[in-house]
């Protein structure tokens, strides 16, 4: 009786462990084509997105918006003014103004007697 119980228990254990293994193998076999299909679709979508992004960048590359144009214009104007101020400052340092003469006390004419 003891032997029959051990054999039955061993048979149930083998069936219990082999059943999930077989189910896992079957599931993997069914999911492999689906996963590969999803991966190819994802790669195709990435390629399409990259193509669209590069196309948008090429279209937008030559055209600057009005705000960007205004900023560049103001930047150029600011740099021009800074160069003029620098040149004016250098000219003033090279040719210092002559010292101003301080007038002495004014002599008043003597009163007539």
Image: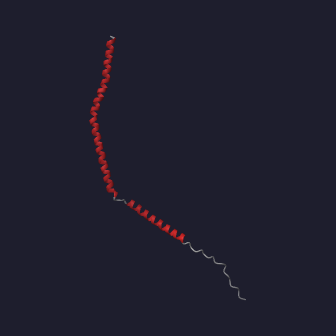
Q: Residue at x 28, y 42 (%)?
A: 41
Q: Which residue is drawn at 29% across and 40% down?
A: 39
- Which quarter of the figure is the C terminus placed in? bottom right
Q: Residue at x 33, y 54 (%)?
A: 57
The percent coordinates of residue 72 (x first, y second) are: 41, 61
Question: In screen coordinates, is 108 left or right of 45?
Answer: right
| Colour basis | secondary structure
Total tally of numbered discs in the picture? 0
Question: In screen coordinates, is 79 left or right of 21?
Answer: right
Question: In screen coordinates, is 113 left or right of 58?
Answer: right
Furthest-top residue in this view: 1
| Residue 4, image quadrant | top left
Q: In this view, does 56 lie above or below 84?
A: above
The percent coordinates of residue 52 (x first, y second) are: 30, 51
The percent coordinates of residue 99 (x first, y second) are: 60, 74
Furthest-front residue in this view: 94
- Which quarter of the figure is the N terminus placed in? top left
The percent coordinates of residue 78 (x first, y second) are: 45, 64
Q: In this view, does 98 lie above or below 27?
A: below
Q: Which residue is drawn at 52% across and 70% down?
A: 91
Q: Is residue 35 above or below residue 60?
A: above
Furthest-bottom residue in this view: 113
The residue lying toward the viewer, choosing from 96 and 46, is 96
The residue lying toward the viewer, choosing from 38 and 110, is 38
Question: In screen coordinates, is 99 left or right of 26?
Answer: right
């Amino acid at each position: 009786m003891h032997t029959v119980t051990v054999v039955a228990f061993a048979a149930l254990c083998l069936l219990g462990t082999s059943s999930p293994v077989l189910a896992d193998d079957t599931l993997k076999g069914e999911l492999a084509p689906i996963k590969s299909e999803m991966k190819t679709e994802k790669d195709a979508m990435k390629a399409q997105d990259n193509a669209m992004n590069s196309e948008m960048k090429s279209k937008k590359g030559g055209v600057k918006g009005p705000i960007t144009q205004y900023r560049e214009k103001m930047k150029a104007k600011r740099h021009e003014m800074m160069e003029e101020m620098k040149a004016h400052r250098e000219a003033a340092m090279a040719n210092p103004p002559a010292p101003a003469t301080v007038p002495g006390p004014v002599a008043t004419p003597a009163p007539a007697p």
